[in-house]
Image: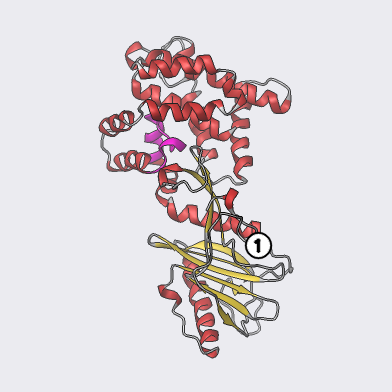
Amino acid sequence: MTESQQPEPGSLPKPGLLVGNIAEPIKLSDLQLNGVSAGAARGGDTIQVWTRLYVTSDDRFFHLAVESLNAHIEYVARKSGRSVNLKRADTVLLVVHPDNTGDLWVDAAAMALQIMVKRNMAAGTVVFENDIADVNGMSFPLVQIGKEDRVVCLFREGWRFALFFDFNPDGEFSVPDMQRDLGTLYRRLKYRDLYDAIADEAIFTRLVAAGWFPFVEIIGSEFRSLANTCEAGFELDDEEAKILARFDAERIERMFSRWMAKPHFAGKERFLRSALKSFADGDAIPVLKIALTEIEGILGDAYHKIHGTRVKINKLLDFAIASAEAKTGQSDTLLFPAAFAHYLKSHTFANFDPTTRTGNVSSRHAVGHGAAAAETYTMVRALQALLTLDQLAFYT
């Protein structure tokens, strides 16, 4: 379920939206859940207590906390005459009410992901992994959660787990905050390989040097193959050729439609259409000349629309990154704004020495000053320039 389809917690689904919980929750009582100790202590010592936390199974504290929480929940369930085995569950949601009664959903509550999609979608359209640009939230839209409630959520994605709890000491439980944090956990589990590739300096440096980034359009199996090839120490030629071959006229047109939905891109329609025609003709030179030199103008128009002034490229790049973070509400989403800032400054807008003419064909400055050799204008580099433009369409 996407964000636009999500009913408010506790409300009925919208007409025509046929969703429901799989089963009723297990009713529990006498749930004494108010915090989890952050460390060991002797009797009489003062300790730190976590009252709100979200963590994945990659963290050692996950295992300490989940064992304790699981023992208490299963103990309370047995006292209530119910037998539950949380270790075999994929998704556990416990909502504890102010009177310490609770509703335990074990693989029974409807779940929804709030996602950013790459293409236009009508209601009822099947969403494939390659359609996902970003995951911004995860929720249980048909479970009522009150402002005085407490929540524990444990879920599995692949071979990893995530734990969220909010014992709400202030009595003001925030469902939107929970949805955001659950979405963060889901991203970290589902796309751990992408985060690892960016965090690994050797892999990421080699990818950037070759002109690659986890661009939204290729995020998933295509970028994964590039990262795996880099990690193995192999040449990228074969993988690059495979990716290039997948950018047929239909895929390029979808990207163009995405650009034209943005006013600051639409004003450059003739230039961009010319670049895409050259790409279809297999002529990399005009693609790179147009795409790389139009980036600054596109960002400048986007900045001017908001701020009413014109600034130089360094401020425009900072503006693009800030826009991406503001759009998603976070800095560690699949748009990877901080990493893209590094990519733009060290690659797309990399400086060069005009006296030695050692400029890279992927550098706007080198291309703009005619300092890149003709043989370096390849179709792979042309594709990378178009993907850079496309990334900015998601950012601004």
* Above or below, comparing residue 201 to residue 296 in the picture: below
Q: Position of residue 306 (x, y in %)?
A: 70, 28
Magenta region: 203-220
On screen, residue 374 versus residue 309, left or right, reads left
- Of the 4 image quadrants, the one containing the C terminus is top right
Above or below, 281 against 29 in this view is above
Residue 313 within the magenta-colored segment of the rendering = no
* Residue name at image x 53 percent, y 67 percent: 21
- Where, by quadrant of the figure, is residue 360 drawn? top left
Q: Residue 244 appears at what percent x and percent y?
A: 33, 28
Q: Which residue is mark 1?
A: 11
Q: Residues within 10 Å of mark 1 (few under 14, many from 20)?
A: few
Q: Is residue 219 magenta?
A: yes
In the visual, does 23 lie left or right of 196? right
- Residue type highlighted by circle 1: Ser
Can I make out residue 352 in this image? no
Across and down, in percent, residue 148 comes to 71, 70
